[in-house]
């Protein structure tokens, strides 16, 4: 194994150790998971319920703990540990009415089966999958493309110094291994698949091995899309790479691309089918993916004139939601308001209406509401998407630069310094052997960054919903630093060469 590959793997190990320190020393309330995903995972792993169902007594244990001690990292840990003992009497199966789809519960249950029914297992499972992705990338690619590995993990290590870890409110919303952070896991697999399609037209040595490695990355990528549906934007550059590759003049090269795309498609369908089949409850209720139109509708609160015009009269829900459409408070209740005002629900029992919340019909109702608002109030919609939301994106990226090093655990700072040393070493070594391809690296990052803006504009940006966007910012900064280091090293080596002569 070459030194560059060793340095690439070392960069992952340094991040994994630093992230483990963060997982153990910086606990979270897991805001998106504590009420349904975690109880559902424990109900499956410890009490044998089908994925997507929660044992009523396990649910009661969590709620009683939160009532007695409040919702905080300590009370959540206590509730998890109590339920993990397995001695709570079996109750009735309750549906887990979450709006994030089946992926997070599937992953959480798998991680708890592997590492035990503990909160930290989710973080460890996340890092384990990331490790498999790194090994796959390093095993497949060499030369300049290897630079993406230390670049990624130095950027992720830098993110451990940001409010994603140092601000408890942000950490509560997006812990490592949580739903809102999970998209980070798809970056290396997406790069791997992109280059497989972009450069995969030439005959390869070890083609069968490369297809197996590609299968590993596809499995991880499909899982991420189930967990975090907003990361579907990563499909765009992959599809573009595949389409451009099919335009080659050489028939043999086009055939190889067609074959590889076909195999990748079949493998993805197989992996997706297996994952869905493991949780038939989600398939039955139509809750496989996360909710999109709910978030799109809720995001209208970012316009200062919300609620626009006569929308309070259009969506009258005061019978169940007294405040009706609102700009302050819990914005999710605006989506619930539309659902309560949905005409077919006026003749349904309230229990049935509640059970269908976040289901397929709920999403159809919210989709209709989104377009109704856009077409009824086009000026406000244009201002929202072209002015207010871009400002929120810029504000989020600026906030992600706010380092408070005094709040960072010292071991993380130590590993961040080591990560910087490994990165500089890699850059210097690359300058003397195989320099980075500037257009390739900047171009791929620019593509991913550009497409990553789509979910931020459909919904909204915040520190806890935008870890991948923050990553692209830090990766760009580090790439500039790497290119400067590479250029200076090349100049020094060139100067020394002529001095020797």
Image (tube, rainbow, N blue to C red):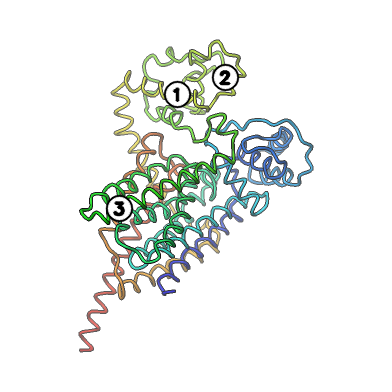
Mark nearest the camera among 1 and 3 is: 3
Q: Residue at x 61, y 36 (%)?
A: 52
Percent x, y of residue 254: 27, 52
- Which label number is shown at residue 255? 3
Residue 404 visible in the current orientation: no
For this rendering, which residue is in front, 118 or 21? 118
On the rendered structure, is 453 left or right of 44? left
Percent x, y of residue 286: 53, 30
Q: Residue furthest bottom?
A: 501
On the rendered structure, is 336 left or right of 231? right
- In the rendered image, which quarter is residue 421 located in? bottom left
For this rendering, which residue is in front, 406 or 28? 28
Q: At numbered mark 3, what does the secondary structure look like: helix, strand or loop?
A: helix
- Which label number is shown at residue 364? 1
Q: Residue furthest top?
A: 347
For the N terminus, the quadrant is bottom left
Q: Is residue 169 above or below residue 308?
A: below
Q: CA distance from mark 2 to mark 3?
A: 52 Å
Choose the circle earlier in sequence order: 1 or 3.
3
Q: CA distance from mark 1 to mark 2?
A: 14 Å
Q: Residues within 10 Å of mark 3 (few under 14, many from 20)?
A: some
Q: Which residue is mark 2?
A: 353
């Amino acid at each position: 194994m070459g030194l560059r590959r060793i340095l690439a793997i070392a960069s992952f190990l340094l991040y994994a150790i630093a992230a483990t320190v963060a997982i153990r020393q910086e606990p979270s309330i897991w805001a998106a998971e504590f009420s349904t995903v975690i109880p559902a995972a424990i109900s499956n792993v410890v009490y044998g319920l089908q994925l997507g169902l929660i044992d009523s007594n396990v649910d009661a244990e969590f709620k009683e703990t939160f009532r007695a001690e409040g919702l905080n990292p300590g009370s959540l840990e206590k509730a998890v540990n109590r339920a993990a003992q397995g001695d709570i009497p079996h109750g009735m199966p309750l549906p887990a009415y979450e709006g994030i789809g089946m992926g997070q519960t599937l992953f959480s249950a798998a991680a708890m089966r592997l590492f035990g029914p503990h909160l930290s297992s989710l973080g460890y499972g996340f890092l384990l999958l990331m490790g498999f992705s790194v090994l796959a990338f390093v095993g497949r690619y060499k030369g300049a493309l290897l630079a993406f590995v230390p670049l990624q993990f130095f950027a992720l290590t830098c993110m451990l110094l940001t409010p994603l870890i140092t601000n408890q409110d942000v950490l509560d919303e997006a812990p490592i291994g949580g739903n809102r952070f999970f998209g980070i896991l798809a970056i290396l697999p997406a790069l791997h698949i992109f280059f497989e399609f972009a450069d995969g037209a030439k005959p390869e040595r070890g083609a069968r091995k490369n297809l197996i490695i590609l299968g590993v990355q596809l499995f991880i990528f499909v899982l991420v899309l189930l967990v975090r549906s907003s990361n579907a934007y990563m499909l765009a550059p992959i599809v573009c790479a595949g389409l451009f590759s099919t335009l080659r003049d050489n028939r043999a090269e086009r055939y190889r691309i067609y074959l590889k795309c076909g195999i990748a498609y079949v493998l993805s369908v197989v992996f997706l089918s297996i994952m869905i089949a493991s949780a038939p409850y989600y398939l039955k209720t139509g809750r496989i993916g996360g909710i999109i139109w709910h978030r799109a509708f809720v995001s209208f609160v970012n316009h200062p004139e919300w609620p626009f015009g006569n929308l309070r009269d259009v969506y009258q829900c005061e019978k169940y939601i007294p405040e009706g459409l609102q700009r302050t408070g819990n914005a999710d209740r605006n989506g619930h308001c539309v659902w309560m005002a949905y005409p077919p629900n006026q003749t349904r029992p309230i229990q049935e209406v509640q059970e269908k919340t976040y289901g397929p019909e709920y999403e159809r109702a919210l989709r209709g509401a989104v377009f109704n608002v856009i077409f009824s109030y086009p000026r406000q919609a244009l201002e929202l998407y072209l002015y207010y939301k871009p400002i929120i994106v810029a504000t989020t990226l600026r906030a992600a630069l706010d380092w408070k090093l005094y709040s960072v655990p010292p071991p993380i700072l130590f590993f961040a310094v080591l990560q910087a040393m490994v990165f500089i070493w890699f850059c210097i070594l690359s300058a003397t052997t195989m320099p980075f391809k500037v257009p390739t690296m900047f171009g791929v990052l620019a593509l991913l960054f550009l497409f990553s803006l789509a979910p931020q504009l459909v919904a909204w940006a915040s520190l806890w919903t935008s870890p991948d966007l923050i990553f692209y910012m830090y990766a760009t900064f580090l790439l500039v630093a790497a290119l400067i280091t590479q250029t200076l090293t090349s100049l020094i080596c060139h100067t020394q060469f002529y001095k020797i002569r």
